[in-house]
Amino acid sequence: MGLERIALISDVHGNLTALEAVLGDIEQRGIERIFNLGDYVGKGPRGSAVVDRCREVCEVNILGNWDDFLPDPEREIDSEGMRWWKKELREDQGNWLRALPFCHDFLLSGRQIRLFHASATSVHTRVRFDHDEQEFLGMFENTEATGDGPIPTVVGYADTHDPFYEVDLAGTLFNIGSVGNSMGDPTPVYVILEGVPDSEQAAPFSVQFVRVPYDAAAELQVATDLGMPELNGYEAEIIHGVYRGNIYANRTPTYHRRPRT
């Protein structure tokens, strides 16, 4: 069996304009398999359309933190924006989101790969690019959330909107960044995995990061026309790549990577 490519996307966050640009790039490359690592909704104006589009084109769909808590009828955290984003979803979409699997495991070129949204323990536990050694090792563990199975040697995740690639302690960890809400560089980013599918034998394997320009001003205009709340925050994120809460803004100097070996 020959090499095959799989596109990994995540954190579209209702940004349909960015999603369509990325899907167009994937199609131009002739890639037919798309895995989605979650966070379809919230922040952007067209979560409902994003959900429908991803259900149509993605072979694998995984639960994100926004997909879990936004449609939750018992959600305690609330705001004008959250009420707007939830109302924009159909009931069946909310049910579909909350029922998504936590992770996806598969073999590629003899490597045991695991994909999830944020961490091995919960979609609400965040592991940033400046993680320590214990956080790194924890990403490869079997937990109650992941279930039992072969221990992964390669882990891909999302959540932080901040792509990176790290090889350490016999494991490979990478973050695929965000399609619809990328921080730092606001250009949508996704990952292409290439290898021999379902193979236990070692074979060529690669991880490629792809940036896809799109019309962010047009996306912001859609949000304006639809009357979406929190427009200033959305503009800061999709135009400038700065987190609206200014907690993790544009890789500020207070965050440092641990030494790489």
Image: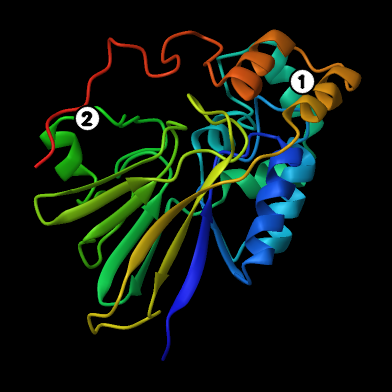
At a point 48% along the width and 24% down the height, the residue shown is 184
Describe the element under mark 2 as helix, strand or loop.
Answer: loop
The quadrant of the image that shows the C terminus is top left
At a point 69% along the width and 45% down the height, the residue shown is 19
Residue 152 on image: x %, y %: 24, 61
**Disc 1 marks which residue?**
84
**Left-right relation of 220 to 209:** right
Q: Nearer the viewer, mark 2 or mark 1?
A: 2
User: Taking 171 as reference, is 38 above or below it?
Assistant: above
**Left-right relation of 140 to 121:** left
Of residues 80 and 177, the one nearer the viewer is 177
Label 2, residues with CA under 10 Å away: few <14, some 14-19, many ≥20: some
Of residues 227 and 190, the one nearer the viewer is 190
- Please indicate, yes or no, whether residue 103 appears anywhere in the rendered image: yes
**Left-right relation of 100 to 152:** right
Residue 88 on image: x %, y %: 80, 30
The quadrant of the image that shows the N terminus is bottom left
Please report whichever mark, 2 or 1, sits nearer to the chain's N-terminal start.
1
At a point 65% along the width and 21% down the height, the residue shown is 239
Amino acid type at mark 1? Trp
**Disc 2 marks which residue?**
131
Of residues 48 and 182, the one nearer the viewer is 182
